[in-house]
Amino acid sequence: MNLTRIYTRTGDAGRTRLADNSEAQKTDLRVEAYGTVDEANAAIALAVALGGLPERVNEMLALIRNEMFDVGADLATPLQEAPEWPPLRIEQPSIDRLEAWCDELSEDLPNLRSFILPGGTPSGAQLHVARTVCRRAERVAWRCLELHGSEVADEPGEGGVSLLALTYLNRLSDLLFIMTRTTNGADGDVLWVPGTDREPPGKRKRTT
């Protein structure tokens, strides 16, 4: 890749090109999906820039931030029968790795007694922001799948959406949640206290 100029004026009419060079409206759900993935990646980048993340979490996020570009490229490339170039797709080993990391980080965490409120350290709170944006990216991608399907097509721009890209976003949002707990520490969970009395979980009197 050799970018000599950032602005091109080609999108001034409200259209853009997908990764297979087919045209789409900028309001197309494919564009919304990979744009939201980009937003989630930027939210992750801010968490890293804030500092204070455990080194192991930083190591994981370094790979994830690159892989999020792969997710965006996947969502930007409709499924095609015989593409001119091999498309960049999310594959099952990437999802397996996220699941393994979920298990690894969960080992040292206490069981939850309530839902967790977004908060904690600045970097931990920012990971909560990244998690919610990732969830939104997944929702947009599912709307995109509902519209375009998951079938392979013969013509550029006509194919469906890769399901593995959606699965990746689902697992990543789970991992980001676990990362917030790892970052905030065992005693750093900000627990939701339901009900109007707001007594801490576990201290309420049982009613008969």
Image (cartoon, rainbow, N blue to C red):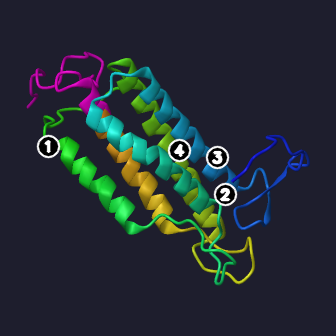
Q: Secondary structure at mark 1?
A: loop
Q: Which mark is in front, 4 or 2?
A: 2
Decide if residue 59 is in sight here. yes
Q: Main secondary structure of the magenta part?
A: loop
- In the rendered structure, the answer to whether residue 23 lies left or right of residue 143 reads right
Residue 116 or residue 131, whichever sits in front: 131
**In the rendered structure, which amino acid carries the disc numbered 2?**
Arg
* CA distance for labels 4 and 2: 14 Å
| Placement of 154 over or under 98, stated as above or below | below
**How would you rate the neighbour count of disc 1 (Cα within 10 Å): few for under 14, some for 14-19, many for 20 or more?**
few
Q: Is residue 159 above or below residue 75?
A: below
Tell me if label 2 and label 3 are in contact, CB under 8 Å.
no
- If you read the primary sequence from the N terminus, does the residue marked by circle 4 or circle 2 appear first? 2
Give whichever of discs 4 and 1 has the lower sequence position: 1
- Which disc is residue 30 wearing? 2
Residue bearing the label numbered 1: 107
Q: Residues within 10 Å of mark 4 (few under 14, many from 20)?
A: some
Question: Residues in magenta?
Answer: 180-208
C-beta proximity under 8 Å, tags 1 and 2: no
Marks 4/1 in contact by CB < 8 Å: the verdict is no
Looking at the rendered image, the disc whose residue lies closer to the viewer, 4 or 1, is 1
Instruction: Give the amino acid type for the residue marked by disc 1 in the picture.
Output: Glu
Q: Is residue 120 above or below residue 68?
A: above
- Rounded to the nearest whole Å, what is the CA distance between mark 1 and mark 2? 37 Å
**Which image quarter holds the C terminus?**
top left
- Dot 3: few (<14), some (14–19), or many (≥20) neighbours within 10 Å? some
Instruction: Write down the residue under mark 3.
Output: 35
The residue wearing badge 4 is 136
Query: Element type at marker 3?
Result: helix
Mark 2: few, some, or many residues within 10 Å (few <14, many ≥20)?
A: many
Q: Is label 4 in contact with label 3 (beta carbons under 8 Å)?
A: no
Residue at 49% over, 67% down: 163
